[in-house]
Amino acid sequence: VLDIGVGEGILASHIAKTLKKFDLKVYYNAIDIDPYFIEKTQVRINYVKVDSSNVIQGDCFSEDLNKLPDNPSLVMASH
C-alpha cells in the first residue's frame, strides 16, 4: 500500500485490518509533509501490526517520493 497524504492514518488502518482478516501480508508505505500526521499514522499502523511499514515525512511532489518502494498494489490519496 502506498498512502500519499496520510492524515491521521485512519483509512490506512482500516484497510490494513481488512487485508489482515484475509490473511494477506500488508506492506504499508506512506508519505506526508506534516510531522504530526506521520506520528499519528505510525501509532495506528503499529497497533494493526502490519508486516512492514515505512512512514516518512516528505513532499510527494519532490524527490522524497523516491524514498518509497516502487510498484505498490494499492495507491491511496485522500483529501
Image (cartoon, grey):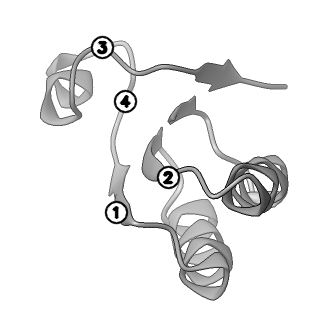
The mark that comes first in sequence, 3 or 2, is: 2
Q: Residue 27's x, y, as percent?
A: 41, 49
The residue that mark 4 highlights is 59
The residue that mark 1 highlights is 52
Q: Amino acid at mark 2?
A: Val
- Is disc 1 in contact with disc 2, using a CB cutoff of under 8 Å? yes
- In the shown orientation, is residue 40 left or right of residue 46? right
Cα distance between the residues tagged 3 and 2: 14 Å
Q: Amino acid at mark 1?
A: Ser
The residue that mark 3 highlights is 71
The mark that comes first in sequence, 1 or 2, is: 2
The mark that comes first in sequence, 4 or 1, is: 1
Secondary structure, mark 4, is loop
Q: Amino acid at mark 3?
A: Asn
Residue found 22% across the figure and 18% down from its top: 70
Identify the disc placed on residue 26.
Answer: 2
Residue found 64% across the figure and 45% down from its top: 6
